[in-house]
């Protein structure tokens, strides 16, 4: 059996010194790396705070995704004051404030260093109708405070095709023309049906200028032929509009001035009620 020679005390001492030097050198390397990262980060922050990294004018804000509104109109509602340091701008805060306004459904804000600028990608919310609260609704026993936020059932405003209510002023301030369609009495009980109703009306060759939801058992449309009584909204609505679309081609032609209303409650027996 081979005999293992004992390790000398000198060798152990040398090995210990070598390990200590290695640990010292690794510590120096870690310290220099940390110092380098600290200096680099500090230099970067210092550079970004210099005058050249500042948003000085609206032209440095690039708007993308806008179709309804001009870039100038969107820039006018930005919560920004010029000049503004690029580093001090909070993209999430700007996006949230934009989305809180009626015209903007969503916004993504990013900072660009070269050249210093803001890029704002937006999705617009298009109004399709003027929403008018039901004038026949009795006043509340506890009316809302003047500071209360306006709502669909309390304040005239605008709605998009999904039924989202928006302040009228938020669009007129941007120069957008108001929609021609008026909706009366749309409330939270009817809102779930609104998107389907609007899509059906929009897909038919019938010009509807007003939709009256005040009577749940009788939806009333105002068209180029006059008032149209639909009855309770249901699965026959598309068929009812299809019948309505054929009436302008009737022989003899219909005279809207002699029509009190068109009754389409029963799709199998539509009839015209003449004015007296």
Image (tube, grey):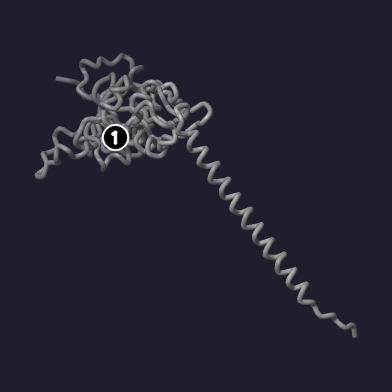
Residue 266: image quadrant is top left
Q: Relative to 58, is 169 on the left or the right?
A: left
Question: Which of 245 and 43 lies nearest the eye of the viewer?
Answer: 43
Residue visible at 30% across and 32% down in the picture? 159
Q: Is residue 176 left or right of residue 184?
A: right
Q: Residue at x 50, y 41 (%)?
A: 42
Pointer 1: residues within 10 angstroms few (<14), some, or many (20+)?
A: many
- Note whether residue 234 is visible: yes
Query: Residue 17: x and y, percent?
Result: 71, 66
Q: Which quadrant does the C terminus fall into?
A: top left
Q: Residue furthest bottom?
A: 1
- Identify the residue under disc 1: 165
Which type of secondary structure does the marked residue at label 1 adopt? strand
Asked if one can make out residue 200 in the rendered structure from this viewpoint, the answer is no
Q: Residue farthest to the left?
A: 141
Q: Nearer the viewer, residue 237 or 198?
A: 198
Residue 76, image x and y in percent? 34, 24
Residue at image coords 58%, 45%: 36
Left or right relative to 39: residue 108: left
Q: Position of residue 4 (x, y in %)?
A: 85, 81
Q: Residue placed farthest to the front in the image?
A: 10
Quarter of image, res 275:
top left
The quadrant in which the N terminus is found is bottom right
Question: Which residue corresponds to the image point at 64% horizontal and 53% vertical from the top-left?
Answer: 29
> Observer-nearest residue: 78 or 219?
78
User: Vertically, is 34 above or below 7?
Assistant: above
Q: Position of residue 254 (x, y in %)?
A: 28, 16
* Picture mark count: 1
Question: Which residue is more in the foreground, 99 or 28?
Answer: 28
């Amino acid at each position: 059996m081979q005999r293992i020679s004992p390790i000398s005390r000198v060798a152990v001492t040398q090995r210990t010194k070598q390990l200590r030097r290695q640990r010292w050198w690794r510590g120096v390397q870690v310290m220099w790396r940390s110092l380098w990262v600290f200096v680099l980060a500090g230099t970067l922050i210092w550079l970004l705070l210099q005058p050249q990294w500042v948003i000085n004018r609206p032209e440095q804000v690039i708007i993308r995704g806008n179709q309804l509104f001009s870039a100038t109109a969107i820039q006018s509602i930005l919560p920004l004051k010029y000049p503004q340091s690029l580093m001090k701008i909070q993209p999430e805060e700007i996006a949230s404030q934009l989305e809180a306004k009626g015209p903007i459904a969503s916004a993504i804000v990013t900072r660009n260093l070269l050249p210093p600028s803001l890029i704002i990608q937006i999705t617009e919310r298009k109004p399709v109708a003027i929403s008018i609260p039901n004038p026949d609704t009795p006043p509340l026993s506890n009316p809302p405070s003047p500071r209360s936020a306006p709502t669909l059932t309390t304040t005239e405003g605008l709605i998009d095709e999904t039924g989202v209510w928006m302040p009228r002023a938020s669009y007129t301030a941007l120069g957008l023309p108001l929609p021609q369609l008026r909706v009366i009495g749309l409330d939270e009980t009817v809102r779930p049906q609104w998107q389907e109703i609007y899509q059906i009306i929009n897909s038919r060759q019938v010009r509807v200028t007003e939709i009256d939801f005040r009577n749940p058992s009788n939806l009333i449309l105002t068209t180029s032929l006059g008032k149209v009584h639909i009855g309770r909204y249901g699965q026959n609505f598309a068929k009812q509009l299809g019948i309505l679309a054929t009436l302008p081609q009737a022989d003899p032609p219909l005279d809207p001035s002699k029509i009190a209303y068109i009754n389409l409650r029963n799709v199998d027996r539509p009839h015209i009620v003449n004015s007296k």
